Image (cartoon, rainbow, N blue to C red):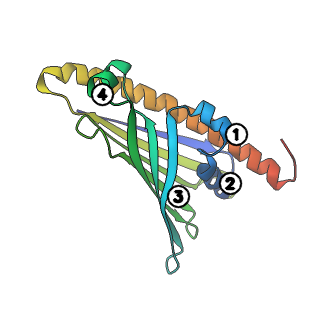
Amino acid sequence: MVRTYKQEHVYKHPWERVTSASWRKFTDPENKRILSHILEVDTLNRKLDRESGKLYTTRAVTVHAPGPWFIRKIIGQEICHCIESTVVDAETHSMQLTSRNISLQKFIEVEEKIRYDPHPDNPSEWTICRQETSIQIKPLSALASMAEKVEQRCVEKFLQNSAKGREVMERICKYLEAESRGITL
């Protein structure tokens, strides 16, 4: 069974500020405390397509393995490696991120898609963030009922982590806004 959830959030900040905050989300020491499930982020590739004006970036993200502690003990792995692919189109003001786990795939598959666009009601001042996440636990047939419970726990944890991510993004956006006005926080 696959669990999928969707969320939308409106940042009351312009697209340029929100996307700048997205790039800084994992680098600030204060954010590391809030986003403690993120262990490491490394840029693997970055390419600007001069014809289309699109920026393509691939990052490796290492996180604490999802799910309850006893599942991590069973599978014998505390961390999970993911790949995040990002496409930024400055012309259309669109930023799309897709993250997938590349380790633990025989136990769990997670795919997260995030898209930042100017908000249709106030495109110069607000940004809409649309997030869609799917989680699938791959159980042994004897563990199917437990797998459903683990999927639900994973969804709950991803929802909590998404809220933390939005908190960090809002904090960075406020910092960037103050910085653009020459104010020190």
Q: Determine which residue is flagged by label 2.
A: 17
The residue under the point 63% across, 37% down is 31
Q: Residue beneath label 4, please?
A: 76
Q: Amino acid under label 4?
A: Gly
Q: CA distance from mark 1 to mark 4?
A: 36 Å
Of the residues under marks 1 and 4, which one precedes in the sequence?
4
Residue 89 visible to an observer of this rendering: yes
- Asked whether, in this view, residue 97 is left or right of residue 78, the answer is right
Between discs 2 and 4, the one toward the N terminus = 2
Q: Counting residues from the N terminus, which is met first, the one under dot 2 or under dot 1?
A: 2
The numbered dot on residue 171 is: 1
Picture coordinates of residue 131, whole percent (x, y): 46, 44
- Name above or below for residue 93 compared with residue 80: below
Q: What kind of element bears circle 4?
A: loop
Crowd around label 3: few <14 · some 14–19 · many ≥20 (10 Å) = many
Disc 3: which residue: 95
25, above or below 53, in the image = above
Residue type at mark 3 is: Met
Residue depth check, mark 4 versus mark 3: number of the one nearer the observer: 4
Amino acid at pointer 2: Arg
Amino acid carrying label 1: it is Arg
Rendering coords of residue 121 (x, y %) = 62, 52
Q: Report how far apart the C-alphas of labels 4 and 3 lie in the structure.
A: 36 Å
